[in-house]
Structure formats: structure tokens, C-alpha cells
Image (cartoon, helix red, strand yellow):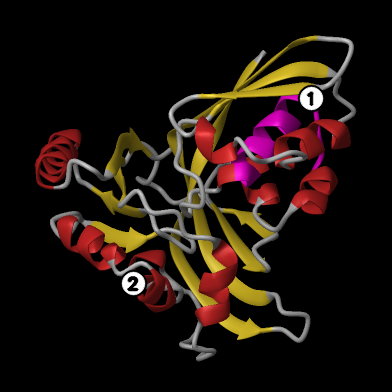
Amino acid sequence: MRETAYAKLNLALHVRAREADGYHRIETIFAFCEDGDVVTAAPAETLTLAVTGPFACALAEEGDNLVLRAARAAGATAALTLDKRLPVAAGLGGGSADAAAVLRLFGGTMADAASLGADVPACLLSRTARGEGRGDAIEPLDLPGLSGTPVLLVNPNIPLATGPVFKAWDGVDRGPLGDWESGRNDLEAAARALVPEIGAVLEALAGARVARMSGSGATCFGLYDNEAARDAAAARIATEKPGWWLSQTRLR
């Protein structure tokens, strides 16, 4: 059994308020890439998890993580392997997408997803959707022409935890989310204050049709009219910034 944990993008993310309980009320458009981490499962008498892949070391100190919690929520007993291909703390869904992949493998429900975190319901769906509330009130969207759009993901190889970015948000409500293309990411200023390299990433993506930070960063994405333009941008950035992480993919 094998399932892709599709990389999550926030095509736009408007932060509307900080609630009394510390959570934030947002409006966002989720989209998902064709690629991501990969979860495999084999029959076993007990639940185990092995982590492999280029970013496995970032999870080496974790004990009870979202993948194991998702498996228990779905009543699974299996030998799980997580091939960690996406950077950690990167604004791409991360553990939420991995947990959602496990739920899909074992028939987990939206209720299971909601119990695991605000992004997990959208990641369980893994299709274009509007998110409100904490991001867990999901409404699927049909945006013609979006599926198959070439995407370039770029991360300066600097992890950026979600909590400090939301904490650094200035508290200003800049208005509701309408058309995602004319939208924005209200967390960008806070994220750039913590990781200034995000500004350089966005400058490197300036030739894209749309270039924006995803989630709380530090990954940014560029949407392109064709794969040739995307691949040319990737080649240029790889030459100019060999230490950055890049992924050439498409929207689902």
C-alpha cells in the first residue's frame, strides 16, 4: 500500500483576526501539487514507523508524531515507512499531509482529520478548496484551468515554524479573500522578518505568472504558463543559489 502526501499550497492566505484562544481566523485557497512525501504500509502485528528520504534527519528526534497519531485514529496496525521528500517546517503541509495520506490508506474520516490539526482536513481532501475558520472549514472549489499548471517550489533551506510567524502577525485585518489571483499572503511580512531570505526567493521567482509565499513559509511558489518556462527558471535558480531546495511539479 502506497500513498502520496501531496504538497499543500496556499494560493492566497488572508488572516482576518486573532481569536481569544490564540488561534487565528483565516480565509485561504488551498491547492495541491502532484508530488510530495510518500507513505507506504506493510502488514504487521504492531504499529511502527520508519522515516527515510532526504529530510528524514529533521524528524530523527520526534517520537509520537502526526503519522502515528493518524494511524491510531484510523485503527491501523502496520509497518509504516515515510519517505520524507519535502523540507520540514516549510509551509507545504508537512506532517498534516503525511497524516492525511495515512488516513486515506486506512479509511480515516474527516472527523479523524479534524482531530489531528487544522490543515489535516484540507490535506485529506487534497484538491483545490476554500478554507475558512482555522482553515478547517473546507469547501471544494472548481477553478477551471488550474489543474496541470506548472509549479516551481523554492525554499532557502531554512526551517520556519508556524507558531512564531502567526505570533508575529501585526493584527491588521486587510480585508476578505475574493479572487485568489488578486489575493495575498498576510503572513509574508512576519515570515520575512524572521527569515529575510524569503524576499530573495520571491525575487528569484519574479518571472512567474504568480509568485507567492505558501502558508507560513519559508517555501515560495511560482506558477508558470508552460513547463519550459518553469524549467528555465529552475535551472537559473539552481545555478545562482545551489544551496536552495527546488521542486518542479504541477498542480493536481
Magenta stretch contains residue 99 = yes
Q: How many marks?
A: 2
Was residue 146 drawn as part of the magenta stretch in this picture?
A: no
Q: Is residue 16 above or below residue 87?
A: below
Residue 66 located left or right of residue 235: right
Would residue 113 be seen by someone viewing this image from the given angle?
yes
Q: Secondary structure at mark 2?
A: helix
Most foreground residue, 128 or 248: 248
- Quick one: which residue is furthest to the top in this view? 43
Residue beneath disc 1: 106
Please state, as top left, top right, bottom left or bottom right, where the N terminus lies in the image: top right
- Looking at this view, is 128 or 22 the one in front? 22
What amino acid type should be assigned to the residue bearing mark 1? Phe
Question: From the viewer's perspective, is residue 23 above or below residue 212?
Answer: below
Please rate how many residues cluster around mark 2, counting C-alpha atoms within 10 Å: few if below 14, some from 14 to 19, many from 20: few
Which residue is at a point 71% across and 20% down the rendered structure image? 80
Identify the amino acid type marked 2: Ser
The mark closer to the camera, 2 or 1, is 1
Magenta span dominant secondary structure: helix
> x, y (%) of residue 128?
52, 48
User: What's the CA distance linking mark 2 and mark 1?
Assistant: 38 Å
Q: Which residues are magenta?
A: 95-109
Q: In the rendered view, does 20 fall on the left or right side of 95?
A: right
Other residues around mark 1 within 10 Å, as few (<14) / some (14–19) / many (≥20): some
* Residue bearing the label numbered 2: 182
Residue found at the very far front of the displayed protein = 61
Quarter occupied by residue 233 = top left
Q: Residue at x 48, y 86 (%)?
A: 175
For the point 55% across and 43% down, which residue is it? 127
The dot on residue 83 is: none
Which is more N-terminal, label 1 or label 2?
Answer: 1
